[in-house]
Image (spheres, grey):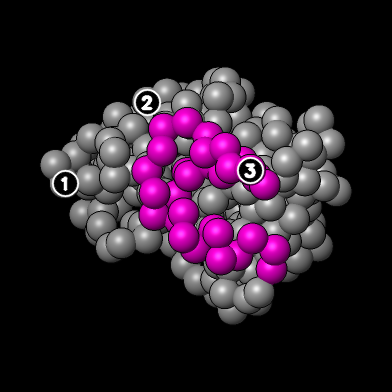
Amino acid sequence: MKPTIIFQPGMAGDLLFIQKIVKTYAADGRRVILPVRQTHKWVYDALVMPANVETPILEEEFDYRDEILFLADKIALSPIDGNAYTFLSLFFCWRYAPEQTMDLKYQIAGVAMDDWADHVELKRDLAKEERLFRELGLDDGVPYALINEHCSKRHIPFPNPAPEKEVRLRVIEGYTLIDWSTVIERAARIASVDTSLVLLVEVLKIRDKPLHVVSRYEPPSFRELQNILKLEWLFYFRPEHLAYN
């Protein structure tokens, strides 16, 4: 069988989201090549994937790298079948329809999207997660709200304070987003801009607490999310609409 090259080299949430595609193509034993940017390698370090899936660093030399760079920005709404490989162009499909970019990844691959979160298997370091929890001062028993005002492009401040103590998601040296999983699970409330944290909450299947998500788009829209979120999120077009009560 020809190898399959799945081109989605970055964005943490997207790398979680496409795991069902990756595992579907790997299920018949074919070689699956999943190049990743160096800056996002940590995502794959935290995922359990089949042995026949390769995750080479995009900036380094590896098989088919020249072909991948040639095809990287091509928009194709179905797999590109070459003589030596099959290429799935997932990264730039947003250019075709920005607000459908998540749905399009699965349409291109020909894979059903509905249970995508069930196919993400995390390699969690529970001791490390617990250490982060303590370093954030959350072992005092006080209920807290996990707040995330950042997406990949910008900072979207939330003007209204949460009723609980606020803990803000941020970059802390030595920890990745996955290492925040215990903080996520123990939060009394989660409020986030539409970004990778929202998809991680879906993977962790966080229930029985308020979940708030604010659009990152201008003009605001939830078209990208409406088919992929299964938990009971409360949606807000603008941050000033965020009402915790």
The mark found on residue 226 in the picture is 2
Residue at image position (55%, 31%) is: 109
- Can you identify the residue that label 1 sits on? 218
Is residue 68 one of those drawn in magenta? yes
Measured as percent of width and height from the top left, residue 58 is found at 58, 68
The magenta-colored residue range is: 62-91
Identify the amino acid type marked 3.
Asn
Helix, strand or loop status at disc 1: loop
Ranked by sequence position, the earlier of labels 2 and 3 is 3
Check contact, mark 2 vs mark 3: CB within 8 A.
no
Relative horizontal placement of residue 156, taking residue 47 as reference (left or right) = left
Q: Is residue 152 above or below residue 108?
A: below
Q: Is residue 92 above or below residue 241?
A: below
Q: Is residue 7 above or below residue 106?
A: below
Relative horizontal placement of residue 74, taking residue 1 as reference (left or right) = left
Helix, strand or loop status at disc 2: loop
- Can you identify the residue that label 3 sits on? 83
Closest to the camera, between mark 1 and mark 3, is 3
The Cα atoms of the two marked residues, 2 and 3, are separated by: 37 Å
Identify the amino acid type marked 2.
Gln
Q: Residues within 10 Å of mark 3 (few under 14, many from 20)?
A: few
Identify the amino acid type marked 1.
Glu
Quadrant in which residue 121 is drawn: top right
Residue at image position (57%, 21%) is: 112
Helix, strand or loop status at disc 3: loop
Q: Residues within 10 Å of mark 2 (few under 14, many from 20)?
A: few
